[in-house]
Amino acid sequence: MRGLIVALTVASIAVIGHTAHAAEESSTEYGCEDGQYYNGFQCVPEDDEEQETTGCNQNEPTVPDIPCTGPFGPFDPSLDRYVRPVPDNEIGRYAPDGIYGCPGCLHDGLWENYPDGWIYQLYMHIGHNTGTPSPYQLDRVVWLGEPPGLPPVDPAVLAQQILDDMDLEPVDVGVAPRPIDEDPESMGLVGAPVWMWVVDPSPQTWGPITDSASERGTTVTVTAAVEDAEWDMGDGRSHVCTEPGTPYEARMGVRDSPTCGHRYEQTSGSKPDQAYVVSVTTRWIATWESSSGETGELDVDPLTSTARIRIGERQLIEQ
């Protein structure tokens, strides 16, 4: 740890020295006009005090105010590069029988101490005005006996990223009588059973759904599932159902749903389009666990779907 602190201090001193020359060097290297300097992204006035600085400066080649986190990982001052740990699904490429690890190959010898250490790809920032598609370029691959001075992985942050990538969706509403958007002539009756269900529940609409991701040796697994669904029937009443519900079929006749149902006491004649708006809101539970032993829960925004149904009255005709 002391060696790492010394490396960071030396890198910081080097950054100060290089930054003093940044304005003059970048003016010619990146085509900036007199009175401007290249800040790693664009030419800006030298005396513009409102220009924000990132505080991250690459010494070789000199590029001041680069992003402190690039697409391949965070910038580490002690290595003067962006650091990307090689993920598990790529690590075998550097083994002796891998495409990069054979004797005499480009990355020969990286594997000899694995798994006691770590293999990293180091990326450099080469500037934007270089005619290349990306300002980031792979510089070298290294084996390190201990991780560089990177911030520890926050498993809760990684868990949230996994949850966001799950792309949870609202359910498709199933209801009998059929919604008027599917059948404009459809109409239920006051006092008759109404069935509600989720059409073809999937991992994205009902769960459970599980996914994992790894970052710098920490693996986090997230599991999400619907806890319950609240059906707002549009007449001031609602039902909370813990199951997706039972789809209605004509052969079932006139009877209550065994899992999630309702009976209207008034017609929908006074409602817009003479229809009740039925909405179903799914409430999710998402939990995570980390290879470090930590666990937790994540907040999931409820998801809502709607359908419109008409309810009329049974009329008797006397002769």
Image (spheres, rainbow, N blue to C red):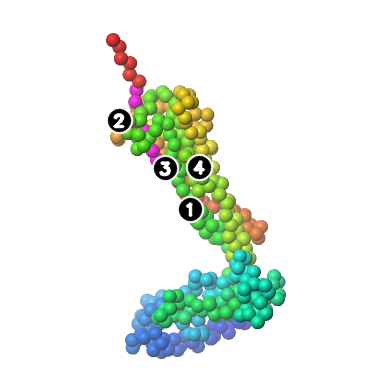
Q: CA distance from mark 3 to mark 1?
A: 16 Å
Residue 305: give its label.
3
Q: CA distance from mark 2 to mark 3?
A: 22 Å
Q: Which residue is mark 1?
A: 167
User: Percent position (x, y) of residue 102?
Assistant: 66, 77
Which class describes the residues within 10 Å of circle 3: few (<14), some (14-19), or many (20+)? some
Q: Which residue is mark 4?
A: 201
Q: Which residue is mark 2?
A: 270
| Residue 220 vertical placement versus 118 (above, below) | above
User: Percent position (x, y) of residue 247?
Assistant: 48, 33
Q: CA distance from mark 2 to mark 4?
A: 33 Å
Q: Give the residue type at disc 1.
A: Asp
Determine whether, in the image, residue 19 is placed left or right of residue 96.
Answer: left
Q: Give the residue type at disc 3.
A: Ser
Determine whether, in the image, residue 158 is placed left or right of residue 250.
Answer: right
Mark 3 residue element: strand
Near-viewer residue (214 or 294): 214
User: Which numbered disc, 4 or 1, marks the residue closer to the eye?
Assistant: 4
Q: Are marks 2 and 1 in contact (CB under 8 Å)?
A: no
The overriding secondary structure of the stretch rendered in magenta is strand
Q: CA distance from mark 4 to mark 1?
A: 14 Å
Span shown in magenta: 303-313
